[in-house]
Image (cartoon, grey):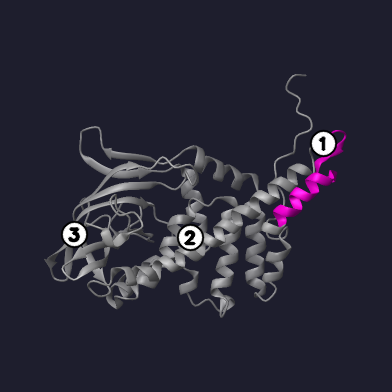
Amino acid sequence: MTDEVTNQSPPMTGGNAWRGDPLLVQLGEDFSDSVRQDLNALGRFVLTQEAQDLARLANSEMPKLRTHDRQGRRLDIVEYHPAYHALMRRSIANGLHSSIWENAEAEKGKRHQVRAARFYLTAELEAGHLCPITMTSASLGALMANPKLFREWAPRVTTRKYDQSQKPPVEKAGLTLGMGMTEKQGGTDVRANQTRAEPAGNGFYRLTGHKWFMSAPMSDAFLVLAQVQEGLSCFLVPRLLAAPKGNGFRFQRLKDKLGNRSNASSEVEFDGAIGEMIGSAGEGVRTIMDMVTLTRLDCAIASAALMRAGLAEAVHHARYRKVFGKLLIDQPLMQRVLADMALDV
């Protein structure tokens, strides 16, 4: 038979990513019973065939930008495969975007640790969709610099309901938030930003300019850095206003990235986009750093999770693959390689 496959590892499904990680289990010993049960269920899901298929499809069927409809009207929307939406729906239901801001008794005193464990397990499955999850969770830290905006937005962010519809924020069951900092001429030097914000009355501003790298472009609003007379400032800018109007977002293209392909990253121009200032004028960097710091923590967690997933795949393969009559896992050199990987993870 030409299609008989031998000496190959089977799919790595049917296990439990939580139970299979002794260090993670040990770190969770002080968690409540209900939290450990949740982590156990999440660990099982991560290694199901269903979950693996969702992760594969979210990355192989990449997001597509539609700037106009067939009659020439602007759309400025990004279309995602249903697998991406399924992952988003599950992660938001698990509270990855909001749990550190909630008051669940089962996580009292350990909200960040519990969320980190959930985030770690989910990142082992698929990290791309966690970008908007991360930014949404972190955004509330920066929004606290404007108590009015925090009171208006936080309840709709923390609903644990994923709403992918193209509607203004006030009409949606749940919201996600992103950020826009980088520009062509400045890169990480955001103080070189040229996007301008002009007063529009009643505390609102009109933003004109661009962002060179703005991920999760279908977020419902973005924390954006723009210049005012006092200097670089931070603004909350909704993507859509009252239906059917947009808010001056003109998406130019999506980045062709090496990895993280399920997560669209866009180049965007702002044509009079309406926003409200967060924090004080001229203190945009200080304000948005409350968001950036939390996203960096998530980046570290996700990176560790990807390394752990790679180690698990390598060990799984070595347990089934034979070379020169012995399983790879029994070869002294391979044992050294895997042990070295394990030390790094």
Residue identified by numbered label 1: 322
Judged by depth in the image, the label closer to the viewer, 2 or 1, is 1
Nearest the camera: 24 or 104?
24
Magenta region: 322-342
Which amino acid type is marked by label 2? Ile
Q: Secondary structure at mark 3?
A: strand
- Locate residue 99, reporting x and y percent: 50, 70
Q: Is residue 22 left or right of residue 99?
A: right
Observer-nearest of 142 and 88: 142
Circles 3 and 1, Cβ within 8 Å, touching? The answer is no
- Residue 281 seen in the figure: yes
Residue 93 lies, in percent from the top left, at 50, 61
Q: CA distance from mark 3 to mark 2?
A: 34 Å
Residue picked out by circle 3: 196
Characterize the local packing of mark 1: few (<14), some (14-19) or many (20 or more) Cα atoms within 10 angstroms.
Answer: some
Query: Where on the picture, by quarter, is residue 152?
Result: bottom left
Q: Is residue 155 visible?
A: no
- Give the SS element for disc 1: strand
Residues packed near mark 2 inside 10 Å, few (<14), some (14 to 19) or many (20 plus): many
Q: Residue at x 48, y 52 (%)?
A: 129
